Image (tube, rainbow, N blue to C red):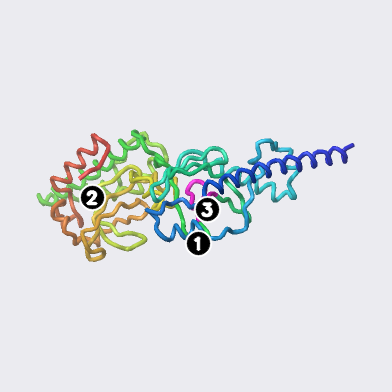
Amino acid sequence: DSQFGRRSAFLHGLRMMLRYWVAKGRRALQSRNLRGGHRFDFSTDAVAGPLARSAAVSPRPPRPRPLLSQGPCWSQHQRSCASSSASSSSRVWDFQASIDALAGEWGDDIGLSIEIKGYEAWFSDGTGPWVFEELDGALLLRGARLTGTPSAPVWQFPGGLERFWARPDAVGTGDTAWSDILLSYKASRLRLRQDLQGAFANHDFDRVISMKSDWEQNLQMPSGLTEDQHRKLVVGQKLIPGACFRHKKFDYRGVILGFDPWCTYPTSWRARWVPNRPAGEAQPFYYCLVDERDRAGRQSRYVAEENLESCEFVFPVEAELVNALFVRSDQLGGYLPGPQLEQALVSQRSTGKFSL
């Protein structure tokens, strides 16, 4: 009886698989008739140029197969009956977890919007739905292989072209409580620097010693913080407007203009330049002037906190806009905001947005 039951379940699963593949073949023929038999990538010709066009019409790799869980009539029991091994079954569920994590809205690095529903994807270039597929242990969509993570997707085409995705809003966006805490803390640290400069100017060295101790001990830390909030404030305690820095990765020097509590740049920029999402885009980001000895041409940068290292030895910074926006302080080994920058910082504390 048990052998007969297993055989019946296998035959039933086989019938369901054949029925699914017949329907899939019909849809593929219809899609080929509509699209002229070509594969398309995520980009548009106007944006991505010849490289994208050559990737779009390149010969097909070995034909991918739809995930077993795509079939509308396949239950968990039927999938397990049709699996040839335990490893292939676990791989299907790995893909299922990835597809679940990809659900929702995305934007890519060339400005397209993407919406994932179930096993299908729609793109703002007017194409879709595109169905997730599996090939050689990799998840495929629109002919591209997922090489990133579901939280920070990178899709690679056979020719090497890559497309990067990010969620429409950075993690932490709209957290006004954290924004108020960070803005208030940075403002108190900046006031201490300004008072310290005043003590130097008045030759009040007892006060200088006292305030230097307050600066190093970080006594401006507010009360009632969570452990995570306390940690984040400690990490950036010396990164305030007017502080000089060195970039940890690219080694260029500069001075900080202002900051945001989280990355506020567009989705396309975050998709391309913030790889360690979602945590990477939830940290403070800093508006910086770059030393022209390292990068010529009045350059400014938007830099993640994890890439900045406070460094007094960078002072003085050579940049055309430094004298227009800052007041130099040799005693502090850095700068204090000038009138225009000070007004921008005051405005940020009321509006939540930094703008010069």
Crowd class of label 3 (few under 14; some 14 to 19; many from 20; radius 10 Å)? some
Quadrant containing the N terminus in the rendered view: top right
The residue identified by callout 1 is 159
Amino acid type shown at disc 3: Arg
Q: Is residue 325 left or right of residue 144?
A: left
Residue 267 position by quadrant: top left
Does residue 98 appear anywhere in the picture?
Answer: no
Disc sitting over residue 39 in the figure: 3
Name the N-terminal-most of marks 3 and 1: 3
Residue span colored magenta: 141-156
SS under mark 1 = loop
Amino acid type shown at disc 2: Leu
SS under mark 2 = strand
- Give x and y (percent) for residue 88: 69, 50
Crowd class of label 1 (few under 14; some 14 to 19; many from 20; radius 10 Å)? few
Disc sitting over residue 257 in the figure: 2
Name the N-terminal-most of marks 2 and 1: 1
Which residue shows up at 37% across the image and 61% down it?
A: 249
Amino acid type shown at disc 1: Gly
Q: Is residue 111 left or right of residue 122?
A: left
Disc sitting over residue 202 in the figure: none
- Give x and y (percent) for residue 145: 54, 54
Which residue is outermost to the left? 202
Quadrant containing the C terminus in the rendered view: top left
Which residue shows up at 58% across the image and 44% down it?
A: 30
SS under mark 3 = loop
Which residue is outermost to the right? 1
In space, the residues marked 2 and 3 are separated at their CA atoms by 46 Å
Q: Nearer the viewer, residue 232 or 8?
A: 8
- Give the tally of numbered discs: 3
Which of the two discs, 2 and 1, sits closer to the camera?
Answer: 1
